[in-house]
Image: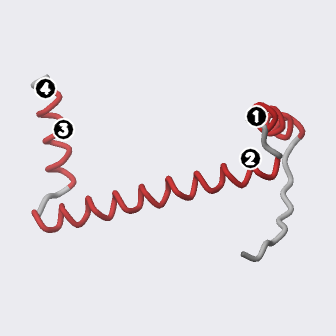
Amino acid sequence: MALATVNLAFDDDFIRQIDYFANNESLTRTDLIYNSVKMYINRRQKLQELYAYGEKIAKENEFTEEDIINDIKEYRKNQ
């Protein structure tokens, strides 16, 4: 895997937070930032997959956004 260098600029307070958490996790600053970005990307990908699945099911069953909102309201009312 080829590596690329990325330069980032953060304010001093944010750098102190990064260093604090990196130290507590026994990580380097680079590893903490890398892991954080990787986690963010993974979560976004999962959300995109979930939205795509929801849109597919809605289309297959001819649900509208209003149908879903009404179903949620009805469910909450009955709880």
Whether residue 9 is situated above or below residue 61 in the rendered picture: above
Quadrant for residue 74, please give it.
Answer: top left
Which residue position is annotated with label 2? Answer: 32
Q: Amino acid at mark 3?
A: Ile
Q: Residue at x 66, y 49 (%)?
A: 36
4 or 1: tag closer to the N-terminus: 1
In front: mark 3 or mark 2? 2
Q: What is the quadrant of the C terminus in the image?
A: top left
| Mark 3 Cα shell of 10 Å, populated few (<14), some (14-19), many (≥20) | few
Residue placed at 82% from the left, 46% from the top? 29
The residues bearing labels 3 and 4 have C-alpha atoms spaced at a distance of 9 Å
- Amino acid carrying label 1: it is Phe
Q: Earlier in the sequence, mark 1 or mark 2?
A: 1
Mark 3 vs 1, N-terminal side = 1
Asked if the residue at tag 2 contacts the one at tag 1, i.e. Cβ–Cβ closer than 8 Å, the answer is yes
Say few, some or many: other residues with alpha carbon within 10 Å of mark 1 (under 14 / 14 to 19 / 20 or more): some
Inter-mark Cα distance, 1 to 2? 8 Å
| CA separation in Å, label 3 and label 2 | 39 Å
Q: Residue furthest top?
A: 79
In-image side of 52 versus 71 (left or right): right
Q: Tell me how far mark 4 sits from mark 2, CA to CA.
A: 44 Å
User: Depth check: 57 or 4 in front?
Assistant: 4
Q: Is residue 2 left or right of residue 72?
A: right
For disc 3, the marked residue is 72
Task: Report the side of 15 relative to 63 (left or right).
Answer: right
Classify mark 2: helix, strand or loop: helix
**Left or right relative to 75: residue 33:** right
**According to the image, label 1 marks what residue?**
21
For the residues bearing labels 4 and 2, Cβ distance under 8 angstroms: no
